[in-house]
């Protein structure tokens, strides 16, 4: 059945305007704006507690926004909740499978709940299960599945009803690198085979590189939004890592000769500089401290994150954990009063 | 991430060649009565599938009724023989046991909503484009069916306590068991929706179910009790399931009138013996009421 608003691909798959969510005093999401084009792979990047999951929950109609609005597949997430739900697939961060049922039974249940035409349930199931390499295991109970198999099954289930937008909340968290890679291969395959928009959150920098565009979120706000390459170009500088005979002398020399601020981390001296490869000969000639090794790298998303938020993603997570604890203490002391 | 120069996204192996499996495009229709019925049916079927694959539960759930029936029934036989007028105490207890076995299983069925929440599966159902009421109705019907079938196993013991295998009796008992199971499941679901942890649910259930079971007259006749106990007995909803069950079973026994009077004098309201149909209606109405409350509660949770 096609409604008048379905199938209009000219409009963004997701449109978000001034979307905000407060939990009492805590501003989890502070008014975010963005559009996702149909067929795009869009990544939400940020440390734990940055507001990614809250945003995804609002887009999936699971949480009501405090203010602002959002449409998914052309439908308002508050007023047209059911229409949004018909058009989206969800893979949550936490498992939501029935482990007492087999893989096929889990998928069948999903298809029935979503009203998939009965004669299409089997063929569709075969397609999605083959895609994630679980077709042979379809009649095995989920409780015997490994973590990676479960996540693959959840992805297959999220696709059972041919959603127009697939939401993946940390789809690869806690998985081994090989499984992570294969999950990405499904996502690419999906893009080739079906018209689908993918919205995902992650806090793995290397995964964000796979997205066509990423939004960096920190403290409930979007601090940067663009293609990964563009964001990296914006950082401008390359990262140079050197091992020297005397790091502290080298830091002083860098400051005096080149006006560059260096930092020692993990036993190596690192600093940012434009056109790093051309800089290396000058470095050897003028530093005056003997250099044992040198390594130049293009900016990574870690650097991008750092330049927009002022901290590494790992440090940001520790900060958030501290902040959360503080908020919890406040809430609890408030309850006692 | 290391400081090595990124060589672009890592190359992922494509395990299945694209196009190896034909793409099957499906679509999700708008909500209709039919789609809601399909949702109810699949939630119901899930309960049955899970029940059928759990043989251990089928066995363990038999332990309690067997204890009541044969240990308590045989143990107290000598003490009670003066009052039962020659009827075995086990026979007297049997209708009550038919009820409580169903009751405990129905409660356990309702608890599955708490499990589903703890293990995340509830979320899968909550985000589906179906009414919340369909999920609750499916859950209650599923619980009722499972508990009803468990009841059949206890029903099969009839011969051991000198109750005849009369087709009408079996049908009647089964019908009553289904009804009771439905009401208890609805009651359990109503409570389970509010509770996030299994331990708390079990605690709350213990607190409610044990008094209900003791007061219902499953283990004693509801007539000639002290005044306070009569009042408590009459307000206990379970009384109105035990009484018609006992009446049904006793109608198929050949026992002296004196024994019948002593053991199956029935539930009275101010001296008026409440007919079975009214009692059944009470149970059914309570079931519907609690189902309604459960649906309402479920619809307002996020």
Image (cartoon, rainbow, N blue to C red):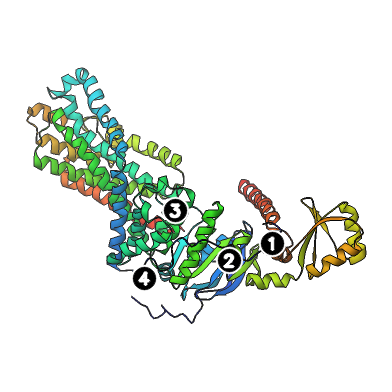
Q: CA distance from mark 4 to mark 3?
A: 24 Å
The residue under label 3 is: A96
Above or below for A26 versus A67: above
- Of circles 4 and 2, the one toward us is 2
Q: CA distance from mark 1 to mark 3?
A: 31 Å
The residue at the point 45 percent across, 48 percent down is: B119
- Of circles 3 and 2, the one toward us is 2
Secondary structure found at label 3: loop
On the same chain: label 3 and label 2? Answer: yes
Query: Is the residue marked by circle 2 packed among few (<14), some (14-19), or many (20+) residues within 10 Å?
Result: many
Above or below for A327 versus B169: below
The percent coordinates of residue B200 (x first, y second) are 45, 41
The residue under label 2 is: A210
Left or right, residue A22 beside residue B46: right
As drawn, the label of residue B25 is 4
Q: Nearer the viewer, residue A266 or B199?
A: A266
Chain at numbered mark 2: A
Chain at numbered mark 4: B
Chain at numbered mark 3: A
The percent coordinates of residue A123 (x first, y second) are 32, 64
């Amino acid at each position: 059945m096609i409604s008048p608003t379905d199938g209009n691909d000219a409009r963004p798959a997701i449109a978000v305007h001034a979307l905000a969510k407060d939990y009492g005093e805590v501003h989890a999401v502070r008014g975010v704006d963005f559009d996702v084009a149909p067929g795009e792979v869009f990544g939400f990047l940020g440390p734990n507690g940055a507001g990614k999951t809250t945003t995804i929950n609002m887009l999936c109609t699971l949480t009501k926004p405090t203010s602002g609005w959002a449409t998914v597949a052309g439908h308002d997430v508050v007023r047209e909740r059911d229409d949004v739900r018909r058009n989206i697939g969800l893979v949550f961060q936490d498992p939501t499978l029935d482990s007492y049922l087999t893989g096929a039974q889990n998928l069948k249940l999903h298809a029935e709940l979503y009203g998939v035409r009965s004669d299409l349930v089997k063929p569709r199931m075969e397609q999605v299960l083959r895609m994630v390499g679980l077709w042979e295991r379809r009649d095995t109970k989920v409780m015997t599945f490994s973590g990676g198999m479960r996540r693959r099954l959840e992805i297959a289930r999220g696709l059972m009803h041919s959603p127009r937008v697939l939401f993946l909340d940390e789809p690869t968290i806690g998985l081994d690198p090989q499984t992570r890679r294969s999950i990405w291969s499904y996502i690419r395959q999906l893009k080739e085979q079906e018209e689908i928009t993918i919205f995902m959150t992650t806090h793995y920098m290397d995964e964000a590189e796979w997205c066509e565009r990423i939004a960096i979120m920190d403290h409930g706000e979007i601090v940067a939004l663009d293609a990964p390459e563009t964001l990296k170009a914006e950082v401008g500088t390359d990262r140079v890592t050197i091992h020297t005979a005397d790091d502290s002398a080298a830091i002083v020399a860098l400051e005096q000769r080149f006006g560059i601020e260096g930092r020692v981390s993990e036993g190596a001296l690192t600093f940012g500089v434009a056109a790093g490869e051309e800089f290396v000969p000058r470095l050897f000639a003028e530093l005056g401290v003997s250099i044992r090794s040198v390594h130049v790298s293009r900016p990574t998303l870690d650097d991008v994150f750092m330049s927009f938020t002022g901290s590494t993603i790992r440090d940001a997570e520790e900060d958030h954990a501290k902040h959360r604890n503080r908020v919890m203490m406040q809430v609890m002391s408030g309850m006692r009063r | 991430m290391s400081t090595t120069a990124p060589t672009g996204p890592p190359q992922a192996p494509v395990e299945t060649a694209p196009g190896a499996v034909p793409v099957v495009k499906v679509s999700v229709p708008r909500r209709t009565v039919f789609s809601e019925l399909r949702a109810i049916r699949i939630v119901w079927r899930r309960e049955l599938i899970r029940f059928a694959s759990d043989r251990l539960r089928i066995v363990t759930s038999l332990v309690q009724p067997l204890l009541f029936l044969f240990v308590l029934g045989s143990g107290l036989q000598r003490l009670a023989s003066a009052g039962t007028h020659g009827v075995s105490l086990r026979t007297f207890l049997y209708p009550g046991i038919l009820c409580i076995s169903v009751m405990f299983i129905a409660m356990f069925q309702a608890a599955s909503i708490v499990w589903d929440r703890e293990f995340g599966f509830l979320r899968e159902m909550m985000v589906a484009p179906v009414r919340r009421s369909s999920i609750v109705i499916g859950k209650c019907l599923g619980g009722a069916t499972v508990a009803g079938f468990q009841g059949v196993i206890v029903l099969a013991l009839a011969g051991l306590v000198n109750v005849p295998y009369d087709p009408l009796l079996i049908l009647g008992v089964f019908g009553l068991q289904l009804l009771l199971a439905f009401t208890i499941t609805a009651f359990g679901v109503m409570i389970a929706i509010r509770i996030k942890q299994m331990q708390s649910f079990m605690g709350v259930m213990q607190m409610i179910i044990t008094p209900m079971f003791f007061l219902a007259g499953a283990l004693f006749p509801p007539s000639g009790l002290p005044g306070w106990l009569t009042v408590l007995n009459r307000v206990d909803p379970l009384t109105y399931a035990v009484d018609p069950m006992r009446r049904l079973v006793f109608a198929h026994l050949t026992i002296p009138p004196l024994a019948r009077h002593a053991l199956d004098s029935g539930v009275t309201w101010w001296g008026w013996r409440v007919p079975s149909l009214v009692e059944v209606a009470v149970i059914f109405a309570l079931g519907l009421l609690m189902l309604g409350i459960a649906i309402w509660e479920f619809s307002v949770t996020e």
